[in-house]
Amino acid sequence: MLVTGRVQGVAFRWATRARAAELGVAGWVRNLDDGRVEVLAEGEEAAVEALVRWLAEGPPAARVLGCDVSSRAPEGRAGFEIVRSAP
C-alpha cells in the first residue's frame, strides 16, 4: 500500500506497527523519499482489510489523502517492523 498526505513526521509508522500487531498482521512500513508511506501487510484477509481501512484514516496527527492498494504473493513474514530502506 502507498499512503499519501501528511503521513511523515506524525508517528504514522509507529502507529501502523501497533495497529498491525493488534490485528495479527505481518509485514513492514517505511517512509519514502517523496513523502509517502509504503506498507506491506500479510495475514488473514479480514485482518489485512481492517489494516487497510485504518490506513485510510491513519493516526490522529496524520491527514491521509489517499491509500493505493495493490496485491502480490505473500512473503511468509512473521511480525511487523519499521524499516528504513527496502526490505
Image (cartoon, rainbow, N blue to C red):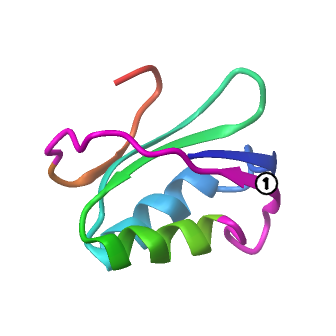
Q: Is residue 42 above or below residue 40?
A: below
Which residue is under mark 1?
Answer: 66
Which corner quadrant of the image does residue 45 belong to?
bottom left
**Numbered label tally:** 1
Q: Is residue 1 magenta?
A: no
Residue drawn at x 79%, y 54% is: 66
Q: Nearer the viewer, residue 31 or 3?
A: 3
Q: Is residue 60 above or below residue 66?
A: below
Q: In the structure shown, which secondary structural element does the residue marked by tag 1 occupy?
A: strand
Residue 64's x, y, as percent?
A: 80, 59
Quadrant into which the C terminus falls: top left
Residue 33's x, y, as percent?
A: 70, 21
**Residue 13 placement, left or right of 6:** left
Residue 35's x, y, as percent?
A: 77, 32
Range of residues picked out in magenta = 56-77
Q: As shown in the figure, which amino acid type bears the numbered disc 1?
A: Gly
Residue drawn at x 43%, y 45% is: 71
Residue drawn at x 36%, y 40% is: 72
